[in-house]
Image (spheres, grey):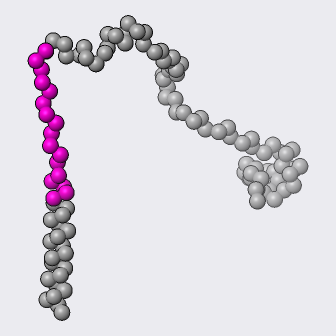
Amino acid sequence: MSQLPHPPVAPAGHHAQPGPHAPAAQLASVGAPAPQPAAPTQVVFPGQVQLPPQPQFTPTPQQAAQFRPGALASGFPRYVPPPPSPVNRTGLYVGILVCVLTLLFAVLGFVLVA
């Protein structure tokens, strides 16, 4: 159920203002406050310039030939990249150790209590 907005509060001694439960025709004659416009979806700060979107172009065949992957290290013909690093499994080993120790202490505690 929607309610009409309350009219502004009148100064003391001014009784011409209708109350919050006044008929709609009386509120319209008084001039109910207009609804506020919606807030903008993007915040713009003072001095900020809105730039138009830049079009994206595909490279020409000459530009694509300049940036082919094999041409990046052409100055080092005998360069051999280092081998990849081994997989770090320290977390896996520590997790397994913690689970095994927890189960071992649980079983020992159960046997001692029983």
Q: Is residue 97 above or below residue 60?
A: below
Count of number-bearing discs: 0
In which quadrant of the rendered view does residue 75 lie? top left
Q: Is residue 94 above or below residue 14?
A: below
Q: Residue at x 17, y 81 (%)?
A: 107
Outermost residue to the right: 25
Outermost residue to the left: 78
Q: Residue 91 vs residue 41: left or right?
A: left
Q: Position of residue 84 (x, y in %)?
A: 16, 36
In which quadrant of the rendered view does residue 36 lie? top right
Asked if residue 102 is among those painted magenta in the image, a careful observer would answer: no
Q: Residue 106 vs residue 27: left or right?
A: left
Q: Residue at x 74, y 43 (%)?
A: 33
Q: Residue 33 vs residue 42: left or right?
A: right
Q: Residue 38 vs residue 13: left or right?
A: left
Give whichever of 15, 54 is nearer the camera: 54
Span shown in magenta: 76-93
Q: Main secondary structure of the magenta part?
A: loop
Outermost residue to the top: 62
Residue 11 appears anywhere in the view: no
The quarter in which the N terminus is drawn is: bottom right
Q: Position of residue 50 (x, y in %)?
A: 52, 21
Q: Position of residue 89 (x, y in %)?
A: 17, 52
